[in-house]
Image (cartoon, rainbow, N blue to C red):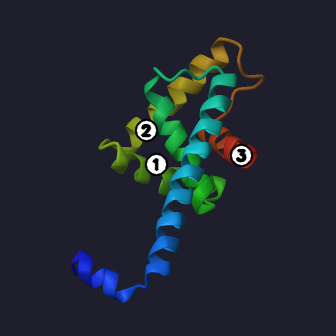
Amino acid sequence: MNLNEVYLLFSEDSLDYLKEEYINEIINRKILDVRISMLLDEYGIQSNYCGYEYLKESIITVKENSFSANAITKQVYPLVAKKYDTNNSCVEHAIRHALKISYSKGFMDMKYTNCQFIYKIAKII
């Protein structure tokens, strides 16, 4: 189906609505991204850590799809790994390493597992 056929299927008003919905989705995703970045910064997780992007993407995935804490290792890690062209264990290890560094520097009051931390931040935002 080409673009002209798509235009024929929808009225101009519905296309404007779809554009608006798409723009709102992009804006909401960016706001979510900034809020997560600010929280990770508060916990001392720096953007130069490999696990930083994996953490952000895991938190967004949990938030957007309402995954339970139990589903993180079986459902969220594979999605994140696929996006970043890596494997589940690399995602898990990089996140664990970022959390370990943050804890060792005194940014966290307790030692969180990956799942606990991801779920905690997803609940906060």
Query: 63 above or below 115?
Result: below
Q: CA distance from mark 1 to mark 2?
A: 6 Å
Q: Which dot marks residue 125?
A: 3
Query: 51 above or below 63?
Result: above
Q: Quadrant of residue 5?
A: bottom left
Disc 1 to disc 2: CB gap under 8 Å: yes
At horizontal 75% and vertical 25% (from top left) the residue drawn is 110
Percent position of residue 1, x then y: 22, 81
Q: Residue furthest bottom?
A: 9
Crowding at dot 3, Cα within 10 Å, few <14 / some 14-19 / many 20+, comes out as: few
Q: Residue furthest front?
A: 12
Q: Residue furthest left?
A: 2
Percent position of residue 105, x then y: 65, 11
**Residue type (three-letter) at the residue carrying disc 2:** Val
Q: What residue does disc 2 label?
A: 91
Q: Which dot marks residue 77?
A: 1
Say whether disc 3 or disc 1 marks the residue closer to the N-terminus: 1
**Residue type (three-letter) at the residue carrying disc 1:** Tyr
Report the number of discs: 3
